[in-house]
Image (cartoon, helix red, strand yellow):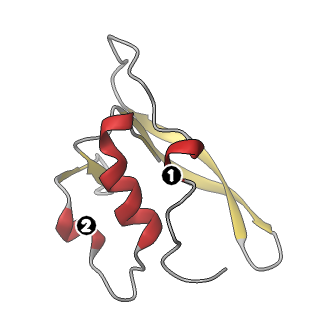
């Protein structure tokens, strides 16, 4: 799970507006591996890695309840975070 600041709308557009069926999204961003090998976006201002505790059937989607296993260092300054209003116009990579 990554937290982006408002200057990183491009990453939100890539991961929210493209489908992994057609685009290798991680080939288009700078990243490094976490302790368990999960990709961490280097441009994220905060992140956590977690294991899935519970899966929740939500009809046409599945929700996941994660338990953090690794977290980013604390943020020293409070960035202007990317919010829903900043990305609500992104067309999804595929229909729900």
The quarter of the displayed image where residue 84 is located: top right
Where residue 15 appears, as percent x and y from the top left, is: 40, 64
Q: Is residue 87 above or below residue 74?
A: below
**Dot 2 surroundings within 10 Å: few (below 14), some, or many (20 or more)?**
some
81, 24: nearer the viewer: 81
Which quadrant: the C terminus? bottom right
Where residue 27 appears, as percent x and y from the top left, is: 18, 70
95 sits to left or right of 4: right
Residue 87 image label: 1
Precedes in sequence: disc 1 or disc 2? 2
Q: Residue at x 37, y 18 (%)?
A: 74
- Number of disc labels: 2
88 sits to left or right of 71: right
Where residue 37 appears, as percent x and y from the top left, is: 28, 57
Q: Is residue 79 above or below residue 2?
A: above
62, 83: nearer the viewer: 83
Residue 66 image label: none
Q: Residue at x 32, y 11 (%)?
A: 76
79 sits to left or right of 51: left
CA–CA distance in space, label 1 to label 2? 19 Å
Q: Is residue 31 above or below residue 4?
A: below
Residue at which label 2 appears: 26
The quarter of the displayed image where residue 43 is located: top left
Q: Residue at x 36, y 30 (%)?
A: 72
1, 19: nearer the viewer: 19
């Amino acid at each position: 799970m990554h937290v982006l600041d408002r200057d990183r709308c491009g990453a939100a557009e890539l991961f929210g507006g493209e489908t992994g069926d057609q685009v290798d999204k991680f080939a288009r961003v700078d990243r490094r591996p976490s302790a368990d090998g999960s990709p961490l976006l280097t441009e994220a201002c905060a992140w956590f890695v977690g294991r899935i505790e519970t899966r929740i059937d939500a009809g046409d989607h599945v929700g996941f309840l994660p338990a953090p296993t690794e977290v980013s260092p604390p943020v020293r300054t409070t960035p202007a975070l990317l919010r829903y209003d900043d990305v609500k116009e992104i067309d999804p990579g595929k229909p729900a």
